[in-house]
Amino acid sequence: MKITVFILFCFFTSIGVLAQNSKTLYGNKGNVNSIAFSPDSKTIASGDESGNLVFWDPETGNKTYSLNINTNITSVNYSSESAGLFVYTTFDGYVTIMKSATKEIVKNFSKDANIYYAVFSPQGDKLAVTYLTEPSSKDRDKGIRVSYSVDIYETVKYEKLKTLRLARASDFTSELFGSDYFESYRFDYFNCEFNPSGTYIASGSLGKNIPIYSFEYKKFAPPYKGHSKRVFFVTFSPDGNYLASASKDETVKLWNISSGSTILTLKGHTNDVNSTAFSPDGKYVASSSDDETVKIWDVKTTRLMKTLDGFNADVITVKFSPDGKYLAAGGSNEKVLLWEVQDILQ
């Protein structure tokens, strides 16, 4: 009897270790495609494939607001605190901008496209939206089956300033897909992000290369080359000196912005890497993967600091809170897990 009790104690203790003291936030259904912290770190938002937009207090884990729009939410993001806005996108082509404090809708517009992501520039003067459309007949004749673009809007009347077309007939590194666009069962591809000064925008890619557009020079910089499969997610470091990219090739790469060259390749995941995030101090980068884990890496030494599990499902999205206190991740099992960074990195 004593041996049985001891075995059970060890089993449940090991389960606790695997969960690594995470807090589970409930309210989503199906794949959690995107999460975001408010600028003051007092709210965490998520959107899922069932159309649930959920907000929590990360300190208590309590739900503070939710709504269901009955369609697949592909991304959620906050603007700067001074702008006070929140944006979410849907796969069926809608972009909705709300006041973050009151949830009052400021602007709602649609495109005849599958929308994947929207993000505000750090200065709040631009909104970038990534989407896929069916190609023109001319492009189809050239073998292009998917047209991937990023639209740039100003944020007064939300009039379009520019379209950056990223899938071109001359881009021979792009993968081609069938009429269903992707073999994916979820919709977390592809994101884009402004650098901290708002002078550049980088994007995920249908191919192996990362496109970088300069607003200052009004043209694309040489693409970042190094991944062997398509790039799902990109993000800039807080100081703007580095770019991290997550890829289907199971790696995270860190790039030097000034040279455009790879400085580090982080290997350790055993399946697609879906997203990545820098800590606010730039010391760490977190990555989420279909191998059901979140990994945290030391940027300076490339050391793997921690592997977080407990999902038992694909981990789609990961974010640090702006104050550096929390790390959150969402996956394909309706869960959002929340950790206190000091607990997992001590």
Image (cartoon, grey):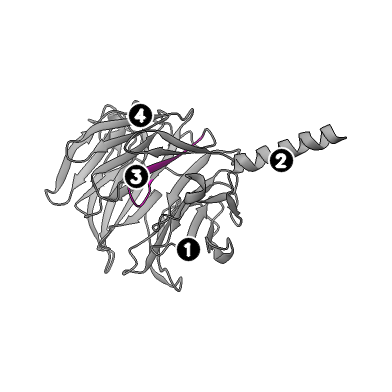
- Look at discs 3 and 4 and give the one toward the viewer: 3
Q: Is residue 279 magenta?
A: yes
Mark nearer the viewer, 2 or 4: 2
Q: Which numbered tag is attached to residue 283?
A: 3
> Type of residue at label 3?
Lys
Disc on the earlier residue, 1 or 3? 1
Between the residue at mark 2 and the residue at mark 3, the CA separation in whole angstroms equals 33 Å
Q: Which mark is residue 43?
A: 1
Numbered tag placed on residue 12 in the rendering: 2
Distance from Cα at disc 2 to Cα at disc 1: 31 Å
Give whichever of discs 2 and 3 has the lower sequence position.
Answer: 2
Segment tinted magenta in the rendering: 278-290
Q: Are marks 2 and 1 in contact (CB under 8 Å)?
A: no
**Residue situated in front as seen by the camera: 289 or 191:** 289
Inter-mark Cα distance, 2 to 4:
45 Å
Q: CA distance from mark 1 to mark 4?
A: 38 Å
Residue at image location 62% in from the left, 40% down from the top? 17
Query: Where is mark 4, residue-wise?
Result: 175
